[in-house]
Image (cartoon, rainbow, N blue to C red):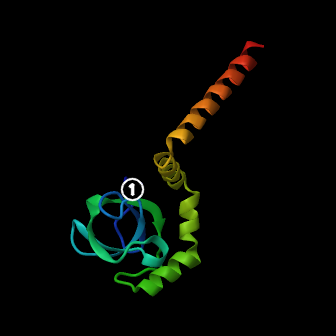
Amino acid sequence: MSMFKRFVEPGRLALITYGPCTGKLCTITDIVDQKRVVVDGPEELTGVRRHMMPIKRLSLTDFCMKTVKRGCKEKTLKKALTEGGIMEKWQATSWAKKLKTQEARKNMTDFDRFKVKCAKQKRSKEVKKALKK
């Protein structure tokens, strides 16, 4: 039984954790050396252009496309992502849902935070009332 399950390999979907593309998904298309890889979005789907990036700035996901070979073209990558339904599968994961809620909370206005506070207070009162019975 292997200790690790997510390997740096061509076709592996990764999340960028640092830099101008933070929070965007990319696909590893080529391995340069021990510490750097070439990633590609493709740009139409994820907003990430093909560029070189240190592995430290990536979080590997469980999704890997075996049809994507090393140094593949953007067209091939786009086709593999759409045919495999990888983006839909990613959106269904708890990791993606957590990132989505974090983004929503980050973009909340003061009034939105107030409404959430009031809703929590109301829910708490209802729970206390139900538990008293």
The residue tagged with tag 1: helix, strand or loop? loop
Check the image and report above or below for 76 versus 130: below
Q: Nearer the viewer, residue 17 or 123?
A: 123
For the C terminus, the quadrant is top right
> Image check: 32 left or right of 127?
left
> Image check: 74 left or right of 133?
left
Check the image and report above or below for 76 versus 32: below
Location of mark 1 (residue): 2
Q: Nearer the viewer, residue 32 or 47?
A: 47
Please provide percent x and percent y for residue 64.
46, 69
Q: Residue visible at 48% across and 49% down?
A: 107
Question: Within the image, what quadrant is residue 30 found in?
Answer: bottom left
Check the image and report above or below for 94 versus 28: above
Please provide percent x and percent y for residue 72.
39, 84
Please provide percent x and percent y for residue 103.
48, 51
Q: Residue visible at 21% across and 72% down?
A: 33
